[in-house]
Amino acid sequence: LLKNEKMNILPKKRWHVRTKDNVAKVRRDIAQAEVEERQRLARVQLAEQEARTRFLISKVEHLIPKERNNVVTVDQSDASGHVNLFADFEFQESTNFGLNREAEQEKRLLKEKEERRIGLLKYLGEGSSEYTKKLAWWQQVPDRHRTKPANNNDVHSSLDVVDVKRGQVNNNHKRKKKMMLSVDELRRKRLNREREERLKAEKLKRKHENNFHERDGGDVDNQQAESAADDNVKPKYSNQFNPIIAKQNRK
């Protein structure tokens, strides 16, 4: 064998069961079995329905009196002359196979009540204010803006309201007058305090001016004496920087 070639033993032999062909075949068989099962169930259901229908028809035929059958067979055409071939079947369906309207209505109401209870059934706009005829809390006018209805038996209600309003006006006037008096008093106290502070400032200013003039007169004499003493003092030199000139310090 060459190095790049692969070993191929029994190319037509299938050693493993799970191959692509087998998997596809199994899937086709399963799908076909499901289709056949659905067809069988459909045939069984159709046979049961036909048997039930035949049983009900035979049971109804024994219960319907002959006079009713005669009347129905005679009256098979309407005023226009059209012949109704299914008059017997329609009559039987309306009498026996028809639903009990009261029972159905009761069942429907019970079902609707249960669905409403669990919140499953809600009509369009059911929770709106147009449906309930009630305003939401944020649409209602606050109680403080409403006027209480007048009591016909209470004669003094309006007079009491007037007295209360008048008392409020008087209290407001007194409070305002008291406030004005307090403001005037505060202004007067402030002016007196400013006047006293101004007098103190002027007095202190005059005192400092007098002290300044007295000190200036003595300072002139002291300055003249100090200048004369400075003239008599000879300058001294440093031995480090001017050793030759510093010898005069000894004289």
Image (spheres, grey):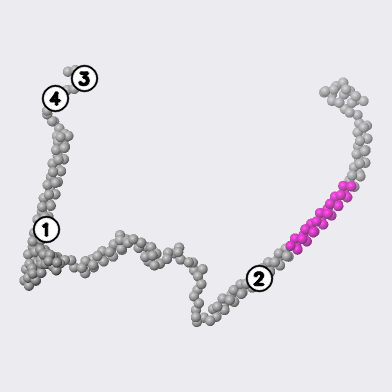
Mark 2 residue element: helix
Instruction: Locate the N terminus by quadrant.
Output: top left
Q: State if disc 4 and disc 2 touch (CB < 8 Å).
A: no
Q: State if disc 3 and disc 4 touch (CB < 8 Å).
A: no
The residue to which callout 4 is attached is: 9
Residue 107 is at least partly visible in this image: yes
Q: Which residue corresponds to the image point at 10% horizontal and 67% vertical from the top-left?
A: 76
Q: Nearer the viewer, mark 2 or mark 4?
A: 2
Residue closest to the eye, 15 or 28 = 28
Mark 3 residue element: loop
Q: Is residue 104 left or right of residue 52?
A: right
- Mark with earlier residue (1, 2): 1
Residue 250 x %, y %: 90, 25
Category of crowding for the residue at label 4, using alpha-carbon neighbours closer than 10 angstroms: few (below 14), some (14–19), many (at least 20): few
Residue 96 is at least partly visible in this image: no
User: Is residue 68 placed above or below 34 in the rendered structure?
Assistant: below
- Mark with earlier residue (2, 4): 4
Q: Nearer the viewer, mark 3 or mark 2?
A: 2
The residue to which callout 1 is attached is: 49
Q: Which residue corresponds to the image point at 7% horizontal and 72% vertical from the top-left?
A: 67
Say which mark, if any, is on residue 165: none
Q: CA distance from mark 4 to mark 1?
A: 61 Å
> Which amino acid type is marked by label 4?
Ile
Say which mark, if any, is on residue 173: 2
Magenta range is 187-213
> Which amino acid type is marked by label 2?
His
The residue to which callout 3 is attached is: 4
Residue 148 x %, y %: 50, 73
Residue 190 x %, y %: 75, 60
